[in-house]
Image (tube, rainbow, N blue to C red):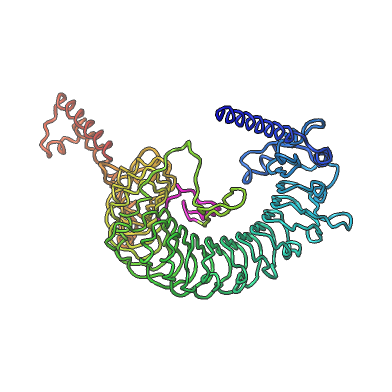
Amino acid sequence: MGYLMLLVVRVVMCVYMFMMFHFACLSSHLCHPDESSALLHFKTQFIFNTSFSEYFYEYECPHVYPKMSTWENGTDCCSWMGVTCHSVSSHVIGLDLSCGALVDNWSGIVHFPLFSKLQNLEYLYLSGCSSLLLKSETSVNHTFSNLMALQLLSSNITGWLEFSGKFPNLDYLKLYNNSLQEKVPEWIHGMDSLTYLNLSHNNFTLMDHFPWYRLQNLDLSFNSMADDISCFFCNATFLEIINLSHNKFTGTFPQCLANSSSPVDLDLQMNKLHGTLPDTFQDLTTLNLNGNQFEGLLPKSLSECSELVDLNLGNNQFEDTFPNWLQNLSKLEILVLRGNKLYGQIVNLKSENIFPSLIIFDISCNNFSGSLPKAYIQNFRAMKIVHDDVQSPLSYIEADWQVIHGTTEYDSSMVATIKRVSLPLTKIPRVFVIIDLSENKFEGEIPDDFGELHGLIGLNLSHNGLVGHIPHSLGNLTNLESLDLSSNMLSGDIPTELINLNFLEVLSLSQNQLVGPIPRGKQFDTFSNDSYEGNTGLCGFPLSIQCNNNVPLQQYPSSEAEDKFGFGWKPVAIGYACGMVLGIGLGYCVFSIGKPEWLVVLFGGKWTKRRSRGNRRRARTTLFQLLVVM
């Protein structure tokens, strides 16, 4: 009996689950007519041009597809591409037309308030609208009560200052690259519910005040804002990602940010901030202050930030010794201290855990002295790894956590100098492995340990006082694309092992004391004279000085010798060569014809016809040999 009851219960449950699933599936394909009509009306405002959009979205969309081409009258709108419906109510709750190959039709301007007819809309993504009017033509106050995420990218937005829409529950707002100007409008200031705000790549000049106490992620980069940020964020207690880079912000470093345990990623590069840094940092993943006017000592509290991945303090006025106390940060991947007033020797500490994850090490343009930091080079374990799986997608250095809709919202960025060019990187690939120790006062020899850093693509040791030979081990760096050893005192020859560097695009060995032949083959046949100028002992292609038995034939006399004799070495060489040819020629004629006889007899010759032939042969052979040698 109990068994039968259990069987009946199972059957009933199965029938119930089947019916629920069946009706849920049916309901998910029953689009509401008014919402379908609103979407079709929106479609009439656009045409599709995939070829145009592929160029327009080159840096924003990996794939462009005319999504609205699937929107047809008489079909279920819940099945249309870019449209998401609720699984039970079938109301349209999501509209994603980003990267959708949208180009405005000649019929007129797209009015944003028409989306208010979709009362259940929870997220809306648009991009590439060349005429998107936010302001309503009437005085109606449009309310988007359910909208939680709004993203408008690369659109010509008009009427945004007078926009009267209300977003009481908006959590995510991204207005990237829309050429918006003047100060941030009041309708954005009034969104108390925001946790994410991105207004980057516009022309905003003023923020006025900071009202978003719930905000966790703020991106105002690439604008023209000139606010004083000294106390800008002190009312925001939840901020975790702050990107104010590439603006004109002024003031000192906000003390409240250094005292807070909330900020994780802080990017203030390329502004006009000044003063000293507080020494109270607690927990950071990124600190980028490149291109400001900070001064004083480096804050030792950074050594307590165990999660620190990106530290960029370049191009400021810090005056301190090398921060050896950072060496045990096991997750640090980027260390940039270039362009400051740092000085002294880098102590070769005895440890096996020195910067184990570092892949970018740039301390150029300072006053460091002593020998190159061999102990550090030996322990750069991450630089010894080669990422050679070309089939896998390129990975970037980024924040370890994600925000709304599963999208990573912060990527490390920097301005890198490689291949003699300043290269702004909005994202840093993990294969971008570089060491730049140039423009310091380093002395001594180049350690062979560099040859173990197989992941390197850029090595710059130029403008120091390095001596000795170029290590043959550098030929092991098969991923190297740029090698600059110029303006040192390096001697010896150029190792032939460097021919193995198949990806080498930039080579500079100029202004050293190198000698011998320049290696030939592969990439070395593509370098110009500029790569070797200032090395008077080098010979071979591409230089005009030819080599013989690995030694230059022409030795250039000093200018003092030319001044002493009143003329240079070239006239002397020409005269000597002409005299030799003329003398040998005359000698040949004399012994050939035997006249004058007294001259032949004087040199012990006995003139006979048979001997004249033999002498003639010997004279030709000697002349040929001399001409070949000459």
Point out the residue furthest to the right here. Answer: 138
Query: Looking at the rendering, in which quadrant would you find the N terminus?
Result: top right
Q: Is 187 on the left-hand or right-hand side of 339?
A: right
The reply, left or right, for residue 367 in relation to residue 276 is left
Q: Residue furthest top?
A: 610
Indicate the position of residue 513 as horizontal and vertical percent values: 31, 56
> Which segment did they paint magenta?
416-435
Q: Position of residue 484 (x, y in %)?
A: 40, 53
Q: Quadrant of the C terminus?
A: top left
For image coordinates 52% across by 61% down, the residue present is 264
Q: Quadrant of residue 512?
A: bottom left
**Foreground: 525 or 625?**
525
| Residue at 61% from the left image edge and 41% from the top image edge | 62
Q: Is residue 544 visible?
A: no
Up-down relation of residue 164 to residue 532 (above or below): below
Q: Is residue 77 magenta?
A: no
Q: How far from the left and from the top, in percent, is residue 568?
A: 34, 56
Give the answer, above or below, for where 211 lies relative to 615: below
